[in-house]
Amino acid sequence: MTSPEVTKLEGTPRDTGRRTSVDLRAEKRVPAVLYGPNVAENIHFSVKELDLERILSVAATKLQDLSIEGTTHRTLLKNVEFDPVTDRAIHADFYVLSDTHPVSLTVPVRLIGTPKGVLEGGGRLFQPLKTLRIKVLPEKIPAEFAIDVAHMEVGQMLRVSDLELDGIIPLEASTRTIVMIKAPKGGKKAAEETGKKKK
């Protein structure tokens, strides 16, 4: 597992209220709030819409060094609200990380390679779980779960319980399937025919 990238981000203090939020969005800025276990009072601010889009454009987990009025906070973008019509971001929540407080987040699952059961057995790959909800201390936050599936045969599956999660608590059931290689349409006979063609 790799550690997340850290993005530098500038925030500008803002007043609260619907009118203010509308004005900010017209200026292509997104209203946001900063909170966390060591934050005495929530901080209301705004960020450039383009900067937020850059963070959202990458599926892997990203942390932010968020600077507001000269103070920098190490944060995790926890939630973003989108306009249902335009799909533009209309509000963002940033969580200030604390070394001693575990944080809950959703991490993407990326598959590496083409399964043997697909290449040689004519099987079909299914990935029911594309993200994994976890609870973890900030120092162990992974950017993603990269899983090598090249060795998997037809009929094999990988569950949450099969992952090596050192210091990470999964919030999904351990029996949930992440990826499986199903038999080809037509079952065993189709697999045998595929095998003959390979010879």
Image: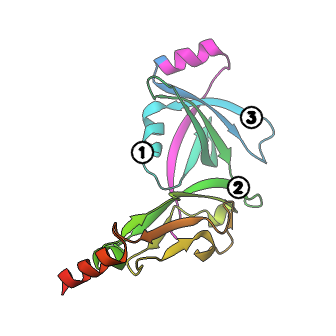
Which of the marked residues, 2 or 1, is nearer the chain's N terminus?
1
Q: Which image quadrant for residue 80?
A: top right
Choose between 155 and 110: the one closer to the eye. 155
Residue at position x 40%, y 81% in the image: 151
All told, the count of numbered labels is 3
Q: Residue furthest top?
A: 19
- Which residue is disc 2 drawn over? 103
Residue range in magenta is: 1-25
C-beta proximity under 8 Å, tags 1 and 3: no
In the rendering, which numbered label is found on residue 57?
1
Please give left or right for residue 56 compared with residue 20 in the image: left
Q: Position of residue 107 (x, y in %)?
A: 56, 57
Nearer to us of marks 1 and 3 is 1
User: Of the residues shown, which amino acid type is indicated by label 3?
Assistant: Asn
Q: Position of residue 33 (x, y in %)?
A: 66, 33
Label 3 Cα crowd, 10 Å radius (few <14 / some 14-19 / many 20+): few
Which of the marked residues, 1 or 3, is nearer the chain's N terminus?
3
User: Of the residues shown, which amino acid type is indicated by label 1?
Assistant: Ser
- Which residue is disc 3 drawn over? 42
User: Of the residues shown, which amino acid type is indicated by label 2?
Assistant: Val
C-beta proximity under 8 Å, tags 3 and 2: no
Residue at position x 63%, y 15% in the image: 18
Nearer to us of marks 3 and 2 is 2
Q: Residue furthest bottom?
A: 199
Please give left or right for residue 121 compared with residue 80 in the image: left
Q: Is residue 11 magenta?
A: yes
